[in-house]
């Protein structure tokens, strides 16, 4: 029934009140005794994550996990695991999920990131069944900018594979109106997806990172993340430097410098002002509902 209600929400801008969260054992699919770690002779171990970056796609999840990795007590999975949203992975069970985690020291926290988690209707319940006390990080950008980044990624992927691509105007607008069938638009309806997460987790278990601010000035945003995770302050302003060639901040860690891949920070395609205005208008009411839902506003157009 919950899945049906969520499906209906995808097509509705009017949002009903957030229902109460279910109990931990509602529809549980995991056995009562769960594997939480597996050891290695050198003293390190693989642990189920205590932190998950749940999204959002093209919101800055890769930058966030790289910056969080600057903290010595954080061990990050390098790849997107897609355990909770891909059936082929989920059916392998928690032992397989555990095997995908990095080896860490006993005092370290493990984090994985899979941006598709946020917009998958079945994921919140599954994560709650694994660990109802887990800490969740959600990084969001201006929804219009996120849509443009989403299109840009698909555009370059198809270009590199010599595949046909549609001009951005043709996917954003249909018959003179915003194309509600374009999946990238749905991913930016943050309040719809957030409602589903709040059925299973209290708001204080989910920290929302301002992705636009992380781009402009990463240090203050990362201090907020440290406080949310109750980590000893270790990330400093000296860990970040602006790379003029790339046009975004890179990282400096114990004298070593590293930047995100060249696929990050790509310029968006030009969009006619009239179409941009349609997008801003389209997201105005959903954004307002999201602000009310989380008790916080963002500087989105």
Image (cartoon, helix red, strand yellow):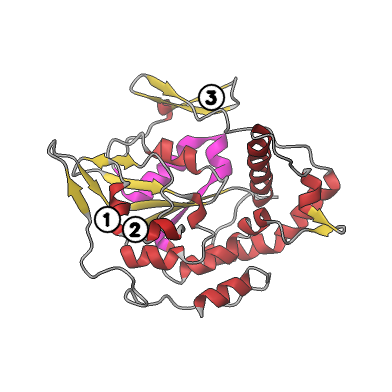
From the image, tell me which residue sits under label 2. 92
Left or right of residue 77: residue 35: left
Are the residues at dot 3 and dot 2 in contact (C-beta closer than 8 Å)? no
Left or right of residue 17: residue 87: left
Check residue 242 in the rendering and tell me which mark sits there, or answer none. 3
Check residue 95 in the rendering and tell me which mark sits there, or answer none. 1
For disc 1, the neighbor class at 10 Å (few under 14, some 14 to 19, many from 20) is: some
Q: Mark 1 to mark 3: distance in Å?
A: 41 Å
Image depth: mark 1 or mark 3 in front: 1
Residue at 76% across, 53% down: 279
Q: What are the residue bounds of the magenta stretch? A: 204-231
Q: Earlier in the sequence, mark 3 or mark 2?
A: 2
Pick the residue in front: 29 or 68.
29
Q: Is residue 213 magenta?
A: yes
**Rendered location of residue 65, percent (x, y):** 42, 41
Are the residues at dot 1 and dot 2 in contact (C-beta closer than 8 Å)? yes
**What element does badge 2 sit on?**
loop
Check residue 175 in the rendering and tell me which mark sits there, or answer none. none
Image depth: mark 3 or mark 2 in front: 2
For disc 3, the neighbor class at 10 Å (few under 14, some 14 to 19, many from 20) is: some
Pick the residue in front: 10 or 192.
10
Residue 291 visible in the current orientation: no
For disc 2, the neighbor class at 10 Å (few under 14, some 14 to 19, many from 20) is: few
Magenta stretch: dominant secondary structure = helix
Q: Mark 3 to mark 2: distance in Å?
A: 42 Å
Pick the residue in front: 293 or 93.
93
**Rendered location of residue 10, percent (x, y):** 63, 68
């Amino acid at each position: 029934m919950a899945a049906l209600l969520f499906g209906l929400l995808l097509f509705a801008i009017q949002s009903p009140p957030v229902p109460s969260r279910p109990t931990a054992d509602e529809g549980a699919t995991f056995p009562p005794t769960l594997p939480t770690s597996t050891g290695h002779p050198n003293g390190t171990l693989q642990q189920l994550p205590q932190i998950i970056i749940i999204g959002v796609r093209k919101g800055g999840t890769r930058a966030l996990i790289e910056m969080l990795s600057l903290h010595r007590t954080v061990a990050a999975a390098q790849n997107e695991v897609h355990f909770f949203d891909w059936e082929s992975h989920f059916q392998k069970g928690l032992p397989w999920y555990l095997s995908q985690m990095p080896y860490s020291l006993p005092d370290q926290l493990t984090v994985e990131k899979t941006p598709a988690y946020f917009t998958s209707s079945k994921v919140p319940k599954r994560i709650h069944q694994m660990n109802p006390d887990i800490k969740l990080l959600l990084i969001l950008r201006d929804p219009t900018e996120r849509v443009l980044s989403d299109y840009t990624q698909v555009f370059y992927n198809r270009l590199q594979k010599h595949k046909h691509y549609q001009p951005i105007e043709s996917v954003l607008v249909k018959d003179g109106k915003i194309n509600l069938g374009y999946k990238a638009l749905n991913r930016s309806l943050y309040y719809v997806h957030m409602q589903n997460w709040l059925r299973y987790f209290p708001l204080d278990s989910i920290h929302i990172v301002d992705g636009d601010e992380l781009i402009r000035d990463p240090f203050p945003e990362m201090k907020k993340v440290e406080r949310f995770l109750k980590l000893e302050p270790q990330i400093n302003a000296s860990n970040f430097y602006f790379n003029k060639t790339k046009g975004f901040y890179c990282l400096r860690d114990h004298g070593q410098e590293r930047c995100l891949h060249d696929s990050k920070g790509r310029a968006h395609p030009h969009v006619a002002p009239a179409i941009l205005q349609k997008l801003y208008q389209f997201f105005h009411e959903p954004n307002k509902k999201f602000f009310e839902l989380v008790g916080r506003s963002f500087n989105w157009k």
